[in-house]
Image (spheres, rainbow, N blue to C red):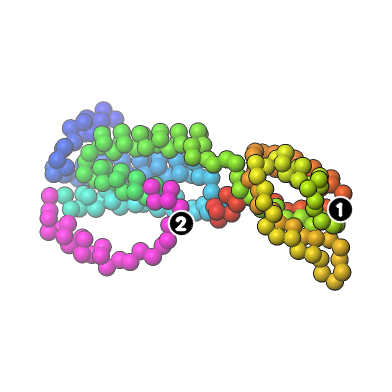
Amino acid sequence: MDRIWQTIQNASVDGTEFSIQGVLLSLLLAFVLGQLLAWLYYFTHTGLSYSRSFVQSLILITVIVSMVMSTIAGSFVVAVGLMGALSIIRFRNIIKDTRDIAFIFSALVIGMASGSQRYGVAILGTFVIGGIILYLHLSEFGTHRPHNAFLRFSLQGYINTQHPILAVLNKFCRSHTMISSQGGNFGEPSVEYAYQVMIKNAARNEQMLDELQKIEGITNVNLTVQEQLLQI
């Protein structure tokens, strides 16, 4: 362990002095740091589009980029040849989440630092990035409240200004706008309503639905939160 740490401290700043031991250490360090980055992604992922292959790709990208940096070190001809070879590849996978792009870019930079034997930069940068990721996740930074939602229900009759449904909506929502009202088919007395609502506290959604269902004549109550749909 002392020899490995000494190698890290004595690594070439210019990244031009390479050896078998240095390349092996670069690849191993890239694997460890890439796995740490992948674990951070796994732990902090909150969306619905989780992909096991993407998590594994973060590790592979880090190691592969480290190997690329070791390959082109000190050789302009090899660098140009590698650029020509990579230009043939066409990447058609669409990244829907901008956060995933940030993780891919982090894997690239960590691999570049490890492959160029800038071990201190790679280790320090990984821990700083990891700390920022944990802070953003634990503090729920950027979370938008209240939530936009769509409320649909059927009612026996029409809603007037004194209807108890409006009282419930005023209690749990900052604002509410009726989008549509459609009468029942084949002589049915029920009317289907659709509201766009701005919920004050998403944790009280069940309480709001419970109070709505207690109102006489209301059926088929359905609440769809817009933020949850955007994560699909």
Which residue corresponds to mark 1? Answer: 217
Quarter assignment of residue 181: bottom right
The verdict on residue 92 being magenta is: yes
Q: Is residue 62 left or right of residue 44?
A: left
Residue type of the residue flagged with mark 2 = Lys
Q: How crowded is mark 1: few (under 14 residues within 10 Å), some or many (20 or more)?
A: few
Residue 72, disc: none
Q: In this view, does 215 lie above or below 4?
A: below
Q: Which mark is residue 96?
A: 2
Residue nearest the observer in this picture, 42 or 99: 99
Q: Give the range drawn in magenta.
A: 74-102
Q: Where is residue 185 in the image (x, y as percent from the top left)?
A: 82, 69
Is residue 227 highlighted in magenta? no
Residue 178 position, x and y percent, is 69, 54
Res. 56 in view? no
The image quarter containing residue 232 is: bottom right
**In the image, what residue occupies the spot 76% across and 42% down?**
168
Q: On the rendered structure, is 148 left or right of 88?
A: right
Query: What is the secondary structure assignment of the residue under circle 2?
Result: loop
181 with respect to 72 (left or right): right
Provide residue 85's location: percent of width, then percent of height.
23, 65
Q: Residue at x 18, y 53 (%)?
A: 72
Please determine whether, in this image, residue 190 is positioned above or below residue 227.
below
Residue located 65% across and 41% down the image = 174
Percent of width and height locating residue 164: 81, 44
